[in-house]
Image (spheres, rainbow, N blue to C red):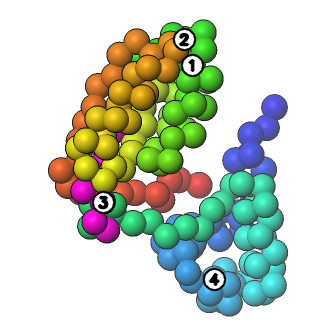
Amino acid sequence: MNSKHDELDEPDKAIIRCLQIDGRRAYADIASELGLSPSTVQQRANRLMDRNLLKVRAVTDPIKMGVPVVAAIALEVDGSIIREIADQIAAFPEVGYVVICAGSYDIQLELACRDNDHLLDVISAISKINGVRSTQTFIYLKIIKNFYQWGV
């Protein structure tokens, strides 16, 4: 079975690479660099976005944006309901990133809170979710690298 990545041809991959460097870059500039027409680049980019293979977003540093408490939380959970737990956590408005993973922890998440009391409230709420066995919290002091240019 082919993955979505296998379905990408070289022009699609090149368009993605260009937009990873500068998500605001004009399609005409990308077209000129790649030897394609601007309408072709726009159609391909729109198709990639429609298929959820490409998202163009503004990436901010929450600490620099004035969000005083940013943290990661690692969870050990009941493996038989891991997806349900991950879905419940993803519904928290403070949570911006949730992954199911292998290793010492089953789920990891990132969240932003207005202060330490707010963080404590969110940790308490997560801890009360059925199937959550333990949590470990890592408060971010400074974000050194925030990288979204994964390979294509």
The alpha-carbon separation of the residues under discs 1 and 2 comes to 5 Å
Mark 1 closeness class: few <14, some 14–19, many ≥20 residues within 10 Å:
some
Task: Look at mark 2 in the image and give the residue it sits on.
Answer: 79
What residue appears at the point 20 percent right and 55 percent down from the top-left corner? 142
**Residue type at numbered disc 2:** Gly
Q: Position of residue 3 (x, y in %)?
A: 74, 40
Q: Residue furthest left?
A: 141
47 relative to 30, above or below: above
**In the picture, residue 80 is in which quadrant?**
top right
Task: Look at mark 4 in the image and give the residue it sits on.
Answer: 30
Q: Nearer the viewer, residue 89 or 110?
A: 89
The local secondary structure at tag 4 comes to helix
Highlighted magenta segment, given as a residue range: 65-72
**Reading the chain from its start, which is encountered first: label 3 or label 1?**
3
Q: Nearer the viewer, residue 55 or 122?
A: 122
Q: Are circles 1 and 2 on residues that touch, CB within 8 Å? A: yes
Q: Is residue 104 visible?
A: no
The alpha-carbon separation of the residues under discs 3 and 2 comes to 33 Å
Q: Quadrant of the C terminus?
A: bottom right
**Residue type at numbered disc 4:** Ile
Task: Look at mark 3 in the image and give the residue it sits on.
Answer: 67
What residue appears at the point 18 percent right and 50 percent down from the top-left corner? 141
**Reading the chain from its start, which is encountered first: label 4 or label 1?**
4
Task: Look at mark 1 in the image and give the residue it sits on.
Answer: 82
**Reading the chain from its start, which is encountered first: label 4 or label 2?**
4
What residue appears at the point 36 percent right and 27 percent down from the top-left corner? 124
